[in-house]
């Protein structure tokens, strides 16, 4: 039984390669259990489940495309489906995929649903990749360096406080974290707290976390009221949560507040250009998808994937490097194709786009 904690990440020496014991489904066509269906045909099929379309636009706009293109370019079939924020639907999709046969499963967890699926897959000898979010029962974890994501967010808050002329120890900072059922949320928190509190920040308020703009808006509004309308900075765990925070700041005409984020989504980039958000952590989805495809293809070919780190429970961890994006770097996200110029540079943002060199 794997431990439930995913927070500790340790480096592995050399080219750390971990052979999957008992994962015959990734080894080139071993028979699956009755109902797993397909025998040798299963070895050429990657089954992917995305979590939703609400917590971030990335899943449907980018991950689906990059995973599909990468797996098919490597000569494998890709069955990619989205649970649409429904735990029961997640399980139904998985059962259908397993019935049709899978050589490997690549799962983005949603509120623990992936753990049940991983147990079923393992029972059929099918290797499981935890994509972006960790969960118990996965054979590999492919994601960004999520503690580093948190560190970059914490530094964002400190940079914003410095620009405002407020010392960290004197600052009123609110923490608006992510859903605690998402293993990454704890890593973001760990990294952010390490940097912020190491500089002297103390959380003035920390409501329950969620990946939801409306809930984050309500939580922050209540926190702001309890603080008498005084706030210098907000650690927001992603751009969607930041958007809820910024709506409250705008309603109260509170400008110059340090606000972090993550994902470099369109709203986040616009808020950065307009000065409402200090920065975002850009996680080039194509880089993460490429690492996941390489891991899946190795398993489908019966080869041994390599990992440079591992989680506390021993799960091999393939890490991808995140990037901090402020107003001067928005143009880089657009030029990379991870945000469309026409979406970012709407009429009310056009002047800021011109100021910071964002071009089609």
Image (cartoon, grey):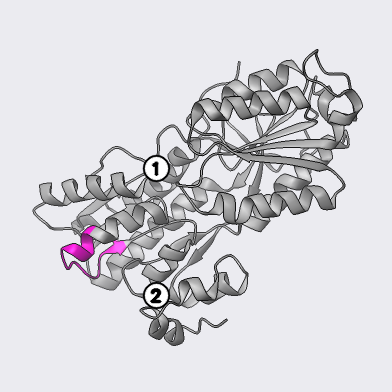
Image quarter hosting the C terminus: bottom right
Q: Which residue is mark 2?
A: 273
- The part of the chain drawn in magenta is 248-258
Measured from the top left, where is residue 138 in percent x and y?
65, 28
Q: Above or below — where is 229 with respect to 179?
A: below
User: Which disc, if any, is residue 78?
Assistant: none
Disc 1 vs disc 2: Cβ atoms closer than 8 Å? no
- Residue at position x 71%, y 20% from top? 122
Which residue is pictured at 37% across the width and 45% down the height?
Answer: 212
Q: Is residue 143 visible?
A: yes
Q: Position of residue 104 (x, y in %)?
A: 76, 32
**213 or 34, nearer to the observer:** 34
Q: Is residue 219 left or right of residue 29?
A: left
Front residue of 233 and 116: 116
* Residue 144 inside the magenta-drawn segment: no
Quadrant of the frame with the N terminus = top right
Kindly report the distance in space between the C-alpha atoms of the residues bearing marks 1 and 2.
24 Å
Q: Position of residue 296 (x, y in %)?
A: 77, 40
Please give the name of the residue rendered at 49% of the width and 62% of the height, measured from the top-left corner: 264
Q: Please tell me how crowded label 2 is: few (under 14), some (14-19), or many (20+) other residues with Cα within 10 Å.
A: many
The residue that mark 1 highlights is 178
């Amino acid at each position: 039984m794997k431990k439930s904690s995913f927070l500790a990440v340790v480096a592995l020496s050399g080219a750390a390669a971990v052979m999957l014991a008992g994962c015959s489904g990734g080894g080139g066509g071993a028979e699956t259990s009755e109902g797993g269906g397909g025998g040798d045909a299963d070895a050429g099929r990657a089954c992917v489940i995305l979590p939703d379309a609400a917590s971030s636009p990335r899943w449907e706009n980018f991950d689906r495309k990059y995973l599909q293109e990468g797996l098919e370019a490597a000569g494998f079939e890709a069955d990619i489906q989205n649970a649409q924020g429904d735990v029961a639907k997640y399980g139904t999709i998985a059962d259908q995929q397993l019935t049709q046969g899978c050589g490997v499963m690549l799962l983005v967890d949603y509120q623990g649903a992936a753990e049940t699926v991983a147990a079923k897959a393992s029972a059929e000898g099918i290797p499981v990749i935890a994509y972006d979010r960790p969960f118990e029962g996965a054979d590999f974890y492919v994601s960004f360096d999520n503690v580093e994501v948190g560190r970059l967010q914490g530094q964002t808050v400190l940079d914003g406080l410095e620009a405002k002329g407020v010392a960290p120890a004197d600052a009123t900072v609110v923490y608006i974290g992510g859903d605690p059922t998402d293993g990454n949320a704890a890593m973001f928190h760990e990294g952010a707290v390490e940097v912020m509190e190491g500089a002297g920040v103390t959380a003035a308020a920390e409501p329950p976390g969620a990946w939801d703009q409306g809930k984050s808006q309500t939580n922050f509004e209540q926190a702001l009221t309890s603080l008498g309308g005084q706030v210098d900075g907000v650690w927001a765990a992603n751009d969607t949560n930041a958007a809820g925070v910024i709506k409250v700041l705008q309603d109260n005409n509170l400008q110059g507040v340090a606000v972090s984020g993550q994902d470099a989504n369109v709203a986040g980039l616009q808020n950065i250009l307009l000065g409402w958000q200090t920065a975002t952590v850009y996680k080039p989805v194509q880089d993460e998808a490429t690492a996941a495809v390489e891991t899946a293809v190795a398993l489908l070919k019966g080869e041994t994937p390599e990992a440079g780190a591992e989680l506390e429970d021993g799960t091999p961890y393939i890490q991808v490097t995140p990037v901090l994006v402020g107003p001067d770097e928005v143009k880089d996200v657009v030029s990379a194709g991870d945000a469309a110029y026409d979406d970012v540079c709407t009429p009310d943002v056009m002047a800021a786009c011109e100021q910071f060199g964002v071009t089609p």
